[in-house]
Image (cartoon, rainbow, N blue to C red):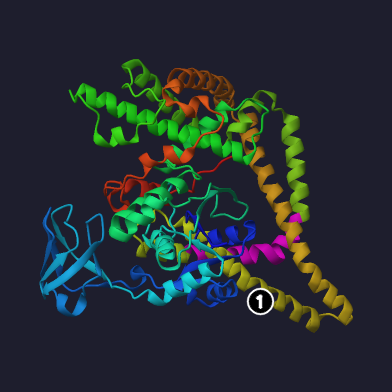
Amino acid sequence: GPVIITGNHNNQFVDGLMLLTNCPREISFMIAQKSWDRPLVGFLARAFHCIPVARPQDMAYKGQGTITLEEGSAKARGVDTHFGTEVTAGSQVDVKGHPKLLKVKEVLSATELLLDSVASSSLSGSFKVQPKVDQSAMYKQVYQSLCSGQCLGIFPEGGSHDRTDLLPLKAGVAVIALEAHSLHHLNVPIVPVGLNYFRGHQFGGRVVMEFGAPIMIPEEIHASYETNRREATEELLNLVAAAMRSVIIPTEDYKTLQQIFMVRRLWVKEGLKLSPSKAMDLNRRFAVGVHRILRLAERAQSAENSVLTPTHELEQTDQAGENQEPLKEEELREFQEMRTELEEYMQTLKKLGIRDHQVPQLVWWTVGDLIGRFLYLLVTLALGVIPNVMFNLPIMIVSSRFAVKEQQKSLKSSSVKLAAYDVVMSYKVIYVLTCIPILYVFYGFMLWCFTDWTHTSRVLSLLSLPMFAFFGMKASEQGVRAYKDIMPLFRRLVNDEKRREQDALPAQRARLQRQLHKLVNTLGPRLGDLYYDDKVEWTKHMTSFGKDDGSRSPKRENQNQSRELKARNLPKEDS
């Protein structure tokens, strides 16, 4: 029957490919008209019966003059503007410095607009206009698809990004599900899917996909939609956002996400390898637990400031079974000390070029290990150098360079991307798919022109090239791993200072593990089912992440995070 699949959107076109190749249902994705018009992407979109969507942000244009907003006022005044010709009722204006788009209710004059909502701050600046788009044809195609029992794929954030949490969801997914019931009497379940990437912008990265429980829209929301569409749509969007966060690891920033991965590795016993689903569950427990502890710290801060009752937000996000008393000073100090020492440990690992899983092995490393790994590196180089130089290296160089250019272009045109890593892999794939046929045609031309082989030998040689390139790629992957193992070993043997620093790591790691277990035993009982239950209902814990009053808007977040990400790669996870 009809179903809507919603996924987080952290890897542009790759997200759709992941769902298509791992979902048993055939999915018709809603795809931006901008992508639909691209030659290769558009061809693939048509082949998979995707539905094009014209997005206002893709048709945005810069308005003349400047707009002045007053906090709490629904009127916008312009200087040297031409609202009568540039703006229409229903369009949205994006004022530089304002955290949210402002919908135009009425154009009063060439220099005055009546907005649908009040401005959240007073400011004056340049602006862009996102025109109102007639989506009736698109919705008609969507409802036809659902009425025929098809599976519809939507990325409700509206565009890809490289953040660690969801962007505010667009209303489209809620409108489609509610209108399908209102107009066609279809009860369409919404299935959240989490796409959790590790080095997702690099070849050889991996992804953990998690399908959540389907959202069956309550009858109360359907009934409310008939009388108050905005309220019902907002209520359903909150349900969808909470369900989507229940299948990812939502954190405030990449630094916190790295710390969550490290804490999970420290918590797991040596030699125990968790399944991907259990590792994700443990990551999520620590992520949500840290968020709760920070809320308790905020509650303690409020108590110190003589605030007798918790804030409305804290009250709304309290969970049954949790001890909501503010953190004691000693507990808060232990928590902060743990985070500080964890960060120091991670920085030491990065400086020494060592991964966490290697630390317990440091005391056993000898010259024999260095020789063995060096020989292994030579073997992998010998096996992989010819196919890599002939096939993989030229394609990788070309695709990477063009992907970086697309990354810079995407970052410049976006206000929500941190470093635009979300587009890198997509363009690498596109350029690889473009370059491979060209390279093989070139080698085929060389075989036919400069060899006296038989036609059969030439054809068999060409057919063997993909397998040849694949073996070269796998050999090079092993060579890179061997090189990463060799460098810490080499530094250990030739530099006494590095050796002493490495020798101190196992004790530092053991101390962190003891601190972590003590802290979990102290603070864990406060967290209710996160601590006690084997199976957690994640959706109920994600409502606190979904409060969007504008303070979590990407435009208002600290830009230092963006600069930091531009200077380094995305967080890596070893195990």
Q: Which residue is mark 1?
A: 438
The amino acid type found where label 1 is placed reads: Ile
Asked if residue 58 lies in the magenta stretch, the reply is: no
* Numbered-mark total: 1
Q: Is residue 350 visible?
A: no
Find residue 150 and report its horizontal and vertical position in percent: 56, 66
Asked if residue 393 lies in the magenta stretch, the reply is: yes
Quarter of the image with the N terminus is bottom right
The answer to which of 320 and 336 lies nearer the viewer is 320
Q: Taking 46 as reference, is 323 above or below it? A: above
Q: Residue at x 75, y 47 (%)?
A: 378
Displayed quadrant of residue 488: top right
Find residue 530 and report its horizontal and vertical position in percent: 48, 29
Q: Taking 201 as reference, is 451 above or below it? A: below
Displayed quadrant of residue 308: top left
In this picture, residue 551 sits left or right of residue 182:
left
In this picture, residue 273 sits left or right of residue 299:
right
Q: Residue at x 26, y 61 (%)?
A: 101
Find residue 364 and report its horizontal and vertical position in percent: 70, 24
User: Magenta residues?
Assistant: 384-404
- At label 1, counting other C-alpha atoms closer than 10 Å, the crowd grade (few under 14, some 14-19, many 20 or more) is few
Q: Residue at x 21, y 72 (%)?
A: 89
Find residue 240 and report its horizontal and vertical position in percent: 43, 51
The answer to which of 359 and 52 lies nearer the viewer is 52
Q: Is residue 523 visible?
A: yes
